[in-house]
Image: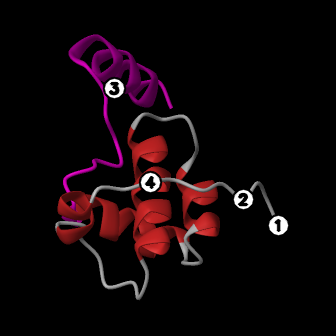
């Protein structure tokens, strides 16, 4: 288990929460995990574990939400391509 917290969420925010979860707390939990994954604070494996899904399923789900699996700038991409060409 983890920390339990109580929050006050305005009704207008609750009304627009996405997701197919039965409760607002589950939707907010999912949004928090996805945002941590998007910011690269947690890995895809950890995010999948926290959302109780397989890693590949998480990657596809996040991609449908506009969260890329690979997020490299031009310099990082050039380095990766150079490294791959030496293999």
Q: Specify the label residue 1 is tagged with.
A: 1
Q: Residue at x 31, y 27 (%)?
A: 72
- Reading the image, the residue beneath label 4 is 8
Q: Secondary structure at mark 3?
A: helix
Ranked by sequence position, the earlier of labels 2 and 3 is: 2
Q: Quadrant of residue 57?
A: bottom left
Q: How is the image coloured?
A: secondary structure
The residue beneath circle 2 is 4
Determine which residue is flagged by label 3.
Answer: 81
Q: Residue 3: x, y in percent? A: 76, 54
Contact? badges 2 and 1 (CB < 8 Å): yes
Q: Are marks 4 and 1 in contact (CB under 8 Å)?
A: no
Locate the N terminus by quadrant. Answer: bottom right
- The answer for how far apart the CA atoms under marks 3 and 4 are is 47 Å
Image quarter of residue 4: bottom right
CA distance for labels 4 and 1:
22 Å
- Image coordinates of residue 19 in percent, x first then y, are 29, 76
The reply to whether the C-beta atoms of the residues labelled 3 and 4 are less than 8 Å apart is no
Q: Are marks 3 and 1 in contact (CB under 8 Å)?
A: no
- Mark 2 or 1, which is nearer the eye? 2
What residue span does the magenta drawing correspond to? 64-87
- Between 49 and 75, the one lying in front of the other is 49
In three-dimensional space, the C-alpha distance between marks 3 and 1, rounded to whole angstroms, equals: 42 Å
1 vs 66, nearest the viewer: 1
Q: Distance from label 2 to label 1 (Cα)?
A: 9 Å
- Viewer-nearest of discs 3 and 4: 4
Q: Secondary structure at mark 4?
A: loop
């Amino acid at each position: 288990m983890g920390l339990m917290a109580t929050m006050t969420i305005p009704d207008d925010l609750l009304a627009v929460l996405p997701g197919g979860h039965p409760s607002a707390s589950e939707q907010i939990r999912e949004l928090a995990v996805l945002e941590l994954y998007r910011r690269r604070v947690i890995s895809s494996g950890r995010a999948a574990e926290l959302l109780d899904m397989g890693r590949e399923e998480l990657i596809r789900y996040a991609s449908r939400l506009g969260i890329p699996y690979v997020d490299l700038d031009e310099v990082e991409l050039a380095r990766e391509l150079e490294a791959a060409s030496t293999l």
